[in-house]
Every structure is written in structure tokens, then in C-alpha cells.
Image (cartoon, rainbow, N blue to C red):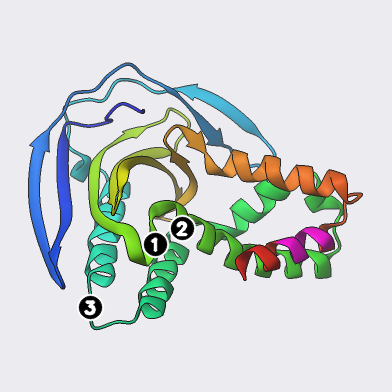
Amino acid sequence: MLPRLGSFIRVFAVAGPGLLILGGCSGQANDSPKLLALSASPATIEWVELEPASERTRFEHPAAEQIDTLGAEAMAVLSDASMSRETRQRRFREMLARELDIPLLARFMLGRYWKKATPEVRRAYEDAFAEYILARYASLLGGAREIQGFEVVGAKASGTGDVLVETRIRRGGADPITTVWRMRDRNGRFVVIDLVVEGLSMAQTQRQEFASTLRSNGGRVEDLTSVLKQKTT
């Protein structure tokens, strides 16, 4: 489990169709973990030590406010009984698409095979990747069926220019999950470049999975694209 990165928690909990309850409680920071950092070059990985959280609340940083807003919007949609399950899933993926830096993630996860691919192969891969990663992240976070509460715990600069925003997500019939959203400033707006779920970097995990697939098929990105389409379906 990752430690809390701040001292204030705001809870978005579903109390019934269309009803949200807001509350708060305090927490303490623990020892600092190591988290994966993606540099501006997608092929570069470095590990950084996080400093203990200060007493400043997450609302003092725009990246934390951004995720706080995402959580409120997501809970409002996912608790709306007037929408079909398919509509709620689609709206949730649209919210994630707004926050994720999908081009950066696509290049990073493809690794050294990106430079070897032709422009046409890259475009087909990026299209398939976008659909795959949105479905994958939505599923990891609980999706339209299971998210019942979204807590923003706090935020902390990583020392590399990125900001880490920690959340806890309550799901139906399962233990809450701790998620750290690694965010980077893009022309005045923060975008998500990695999700660290229960201490595991999704960007690094997917990169390793993609590399394994590519090694087994002789490095053909076209084959990986087909696999992503199949998994999304």
C-alpha cells in the first residue's frame, strides 16, 4: 500500500441514484515509496524518491483540483440511474480520454519498436491503442458497474516536474484500491502520463506486456495492433 501524500481527504460516495455525499477526514503521511517516472522521452524510465507529504492540502495544486473534479464528474455519471450501463461506460471513458496523454502513452508502451514502424503502421496502432487503453483503465478503476466512492487523498511534487495525486476508489464487492495519478504540465493544463495502482505502474506493466508480444511475433507492430483490437472487443 502507498502512503497518503497529503493530510486532507474528500469523499465522493454514492448514497443512492443521483445522490452524492461529501465528507472529510484527516490522515498522516508514512515513509516514502519509489514510483516510476516517465521522462519527456517516452523510452526513458527513472525512479525517484518521494518526499513525505507536507501539511498543505491538495487544493493548493491545480493537478489535484483536476482529479478532484474528475472524481466528482465520474461519480455523478456512474450513479445516474437514468443512463444505460453502456452510456455510463462510454461517458466514463470519455472523461478518462480528456485526462490521459494517450499519444505519449502509446509511444512509451511501444518502446524501441516505435522508430521501426512506418507512419501508416503507427497510425493504425495509435487508433487501436486509444480504444484499448481507455477500456483497460476504466476496467482497472472499477468501470460503470462497480465504482461507489472516489477519495482524493493529496498531492505531492515528484522532484522531476511531475505531480502525484493519490486517490482511493471504493468498488462494489471489493476492497478499495489506491491509485496514484502521475501528471505533467502540458501548456498550462495537466495530463495523466501514468496510473500507479496499488504500487504497480500501469505504463511500465503494459510496456513489458507489449514487448513480450512483439518479441514473440518478430517485432511486427501490425500483429500487436490486431491483439489490442481483439482485447478491446
Q: Residues within 10 Å of mark 1 (few under 14, many from 20)?
A: many
Seen at 72% across and 48% down, the residue is 210
Tell which circle, 2 or 3, labels the residue nearer the N-terminal end: 3
Circles 2 and 3 in contact, beta carbons < 8 Å: no
Query: Quick check: is 226 in the magenta stretch?
Result: yes
Q: Position of residue 202 (x, y in %)?
A: 54, 43
Magenta region: 223-227
Relative depth, front residue between 227 and 134: 227
Quarter holding the N terminus? top left
Looking at the picture, does residue 217 appear above or below residue 7?
Answer: below
Seen at 15% across and 37% down, the residue is 8
In this image, 1 relative to 34: left or right?
A: left
Q: Quadrant of residue 155?
A: top left
Seen at 59% across and 28% down, the residue is 46
In this image, 187 relative to 30: left or right?
A: right
Point out which mark residue 124 bears. none
Circles 1 and 2 in contact, beta carbons < 8 Å: yes
Query: Quick check: is 103 in the magenta stretch?
Result: no
Residue 186, visible in the rendered structure: no
Amino acid type of the residue tagged 2 in the rendering: Ser
The residue indicated by pointer 3 is: 81
The residue indicated by pointer 2 is: 139
Relative depth, front residue between 17 and 22: 17
Seen at 32% across and 39% down, the residue is 166
Tell which circle, 3 or 1, labels the residue nearer the N-terminal end: 3
Label 3 SS: loop
